[in-house]
Image: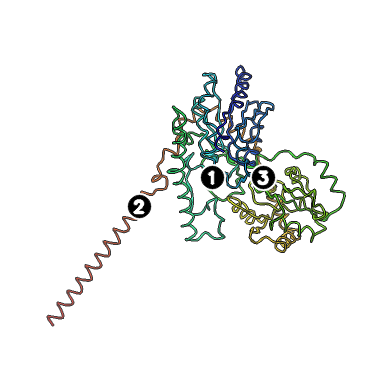
Amino acid sequence: MKNVLQFPMVFIIFIIMWHVIIIRGTKLSNILYISAVASPSHFLWSQQFSKALANNGHNVTLLSIYKEGTQHNLHFLKLDGVDEALSLDHTVDYLALHTMSPTELLASFFELEYMLLSYPKDFTFSLIIHDHLAGPCLLLLLERFHFPPLVMASASNVLSSVECILGSPMYPGFISNYLLDPPASFGYLERIYNTMLTTYELFFKWYYVNPRIDRLIQSHFQNITSVSRLESTAVIVLMNSIAPLEPPEPRIWRVVNVGGLHISIPKMLPTFLYQHMNKTFAKCVYVSFGSNLKLTSLDNHIAQSIITVARLLPNIKFLWKVDVQFTTIDSYIPHNLITSDWFPQNDILASGMVDILFTHGGLLTIQEAIWYGIPMLGTPNYGDQYQNVRRIEQLGIGKKLYLEDLNPVTLQKHLVDMISDGRYKQRATEISKMIRDEQFTAQTKAVWAVEWVLRNYGTLQKLEDLNDVGTLQKYCLDVLLTIICLIMCIVFILNRMIHVGAMFVMSRISRKNKIE
């Protein structure tokens, strides 16, 4: 795998050089977007953002591990060999890709220092956008291009991920860590565990991951500073967050909510869907477990449950996005279950034909469903999916069905209950109306934020930064320690006074008794 990952990015450099020659004489902003998170959903979000910037007149270079090519003002550059190397021996397991990101992803850049010498010395990007969930490895490009303004943008809504970037405070006392299935009540023991986990994650990044990345960078590239420290130079962070749908977590002004940025104007449904719509069904259930969790066979309880329930509910149409090829077993699939390895999800959810979405709880899917007012049945699998599904439960627009509890009986019961209970649809419609009632669209806000940084970067560099505030001061730990020490001293003094007073009284009583 390492040999494949170490292939030089000659093709990428040639494309960038061609891009440079084309645009050097123009006055448009040159924006480099680094989207190296090994997740198709993150790339989809980054691609939509890049298109919005390109449509607004900027020349955007999108660096990812998935796509190459050219569109109007938009150039896709692919990190050679990364995704292919991950797929050499088996299907890519996107659930475990975070374990290879810091080191193996960097391997494809081993020759980058020498290739970058071919760039014009006076060339620079006007701004660099980086998906910070990929880690700071690729921020070495920031130094090579003379430190243009840095903007972080991610398809995640995890605010705690920006603590190392902006120094924004965390609130483990009432905001659950994104790796946890949030409890119904946040009691004392839950708060202790959540605080320990949040602190461990932060210290793990500070004292293990970041130093390891820095050592790896410095062993292969000369004159490169600590890339982990470059994260804190970001001006703002664009978060895929819709404020009314999030927990009540305080945010600093440098965090800009652009949740739902990936939602596009719906198009007409493709022909193959209309061919299956000549039969009348009472309701429609759309089943999608995202781009990461892939079902490649029917030998699992998820697939068996879906097929069985579709057979038990013949009056309900099921649209199932699944990677299994059914050409040889069509007789096994009931007539009301339509399968495909791809559906235009945004268009289907916007069409009004879907009554219930059965989902894994991925953030992008949930945001689309809420935008179009569709109730959801969530079966979370890992990471932030548990919090996402818990949130739709709290909002009254869905229910949760744990993966270990999923079987034909429970799945049928949950679907029938939600379809027959009109309150879910009513509540989903109300929330959809609320989040649509915005002055600006998420794409407009995101593009404006980037252009605002370009216009005001000089002034922004002079503003106060929370990264300059130490941890002791930020959380008043020194003050709390002082108060605790004072209280302990007061308690000790009072205890001694009571003890001395008691001894004095007892001695007086003893003397009086002796005299008598």
Residue at the disc numbered 3 = 291
Q: CA distance from mark 3 to mark 1?
A: 18 Å
Give the residue type that dot 1 points to.
Thr
Per the rendering, the mark at residue 51 is none
Quarter of the image where one finds residue 215: top left
Left-right relation of 291 to 484: right
Q: In this figure, which colouring scheme has been used for the structure?
A: rainbow
Residue 471 coordinates in the image, percent (x, y) = 41, 45
Q: Secondary structure at mark 3?
A: loop
Q: In the image shown, does 53 or 34 lie closer to the viewer?
A: 34
Toward the left, the furthest residue is 515
Label 2 Cα crowd, 10 Å radius (few <14 / some 14-19 / many 20+):
few
Residue at the disc numbered 1 = 99
Residue 184 coordinates in the image, percent (x, y) = 57, 60
Give the residue type that dot 2 points to.
Leu
Q: Where is the N terminus found, in terms of image quarters?
A: top right
Residue at the disc numbered 2 = 481
Residue 409 coordinates in the image, percent (x, y) = 72, 64
Q: Secondary structure at mark 1?
A: helix
Give whichever of discs 2 and 1 has the lower sequence position: 1
Give whichever of discs 3 and 1 has the lower sequence position: 1
Task: Kindly report which numbered mark, 2 or 1, lies closer to the viewer in this rendering.
Answer: 1
